[in-house]
Image (cartoon, helix red, strand yellow):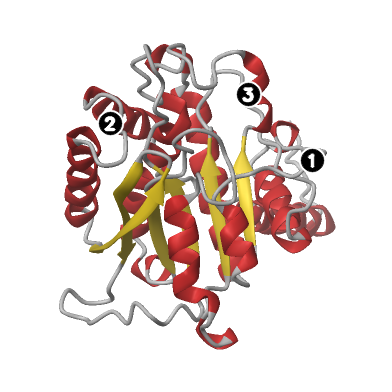
Amino acid sequence: MRPMQISYKRILTLISFAVFFSITVIFLQGCKPNKSQFSGTNAYQHVESLVDFGPRIPGSQAIENARLYIERKLQEFGWVMVRQSFNDDTPNGSIEFINLRARFPMIPDDGIEWKDGGNIILLCSHYDTKILKGIEFIGANDGGSSTGVLLELARVFSNSPEMARRVELVFFDGEEAIVDFTPTDGLYGSRHYAKFWRSAPIDKKPEAAYVLDLVGDKSMRIDPPYDSPSNLLSELYTAANNLGHRSLFGIYPTPITDDHVPLNAAGIPALNIIDSHYISKGKWHTAGDNLNSISEENMDIIGEVVEELIKIKLN
């Protein structure tokens, strides 16, 4: 039996290959987005709690109960809350509406300058439901899913204070028209909120806004309106592509009336992240918009994509 003769050239080649392979693996791992802590199950459970209150009609006890729930959860996650209360004339007379604003302080006693939106990104949802005669409309998808996603994002962001401090969460009251959408009926909360920023100097206005709506349907597809700010739309597509969900994001060929409209008019670039085709699916503003129609998996996708989107925007 003859001992094997070792080729030092072969050994060096094998070592070089092993080092190259190790560096490549490390590089590719570094290029992958970190695994999100977002839980579609948690978001769904928030929606369950919201719909248990019944129709969240502006001025009702049910919507006040929803507000208290939202405030309690955000405070548990370390966020600081303020109510933005106002009265507005509607086809049913004067109604009190209440927007909720939340920011995350660096330290518990750190004061927040609510009039300074510089370097702030808005994440928005409405939490009210449409008044529908003869129907107990609970809005699991319409107003519920987006609110559940924002509450879960609040928990996730609280684990990254530097990121959280760059975000303001806004929950709009009165998105739904009391009768039909007109310039003075509907978008009550966002129209009032936008007034707050309209006259602010450019460097004091929020950097961008993302308005979530109708994001939980089992056959969800997100199609922002064609007139969306191009840079925000491009960043959304990049975030979705990074996570392998690009096929679920497209474009809608016409404008959409939603809470992004007053924000854009106030000089805040705003993107409507919405399932624009939901209206044609037969469940919009019907009793069919219930817990059985929404998906934990799709809310998980939306939450992770929005989290990735915020990371892109802040880098």
**Residue at screen point 32% across, 82% down:** 113
- Specify which label sits upstream in the sequence, 1 or 2: 2
As drawn, the label of residue 117 is: none
As drawn, the label of residue 50 is: 2
Q: Nearer the viewer, mark 1 or mark 2?
A: 1
Q: Position of residue 165 (x, y in %)?
A: 38, 71
Q: Amino acid at mark 2?
A: Leu
**Residue at screen point 65% across, 50% down:** 239
Q: Secondary structure at mark 2?
A: helix
Residue sitting nearer the eye, 92 or 45: 92
Q: Is residue 233 visible?
A: yes
Position of 134 with respect to 213 (left or right) is left
What residue sits right under mark 3 in the picture? 279
Q: Secondary structure at mark 1?
A: loop
Q: Secondary structure at mark 3?
A: helix
Query: Compared with residue 43, is residue 21 higher up or lower down, i.e. above or below?
Result: below
CB contact under 8 Å: marks 2 and 3: no
**Residue at screen point 30% across, 48% down:** 95
Q: Amino acid at mark 3?
A: Ile
Position of 310 with respect to 65 (left or right) is right
**Residue at screen point 53% across, 39% down:** 213
Image quarter where the N terminus lies is top right
| Residues at marks 2 and 3, CA–CA distance in whole angstroms | 22 Å
Query: Compared with residue 248, is residue 282 higher up or lower down, i.e. above or below?
Result: above
What residue sits right under mark 1 in the picture? 254
| Residues at marks 3 and 1, CA–CA distance in whole angstroms | 14 Å
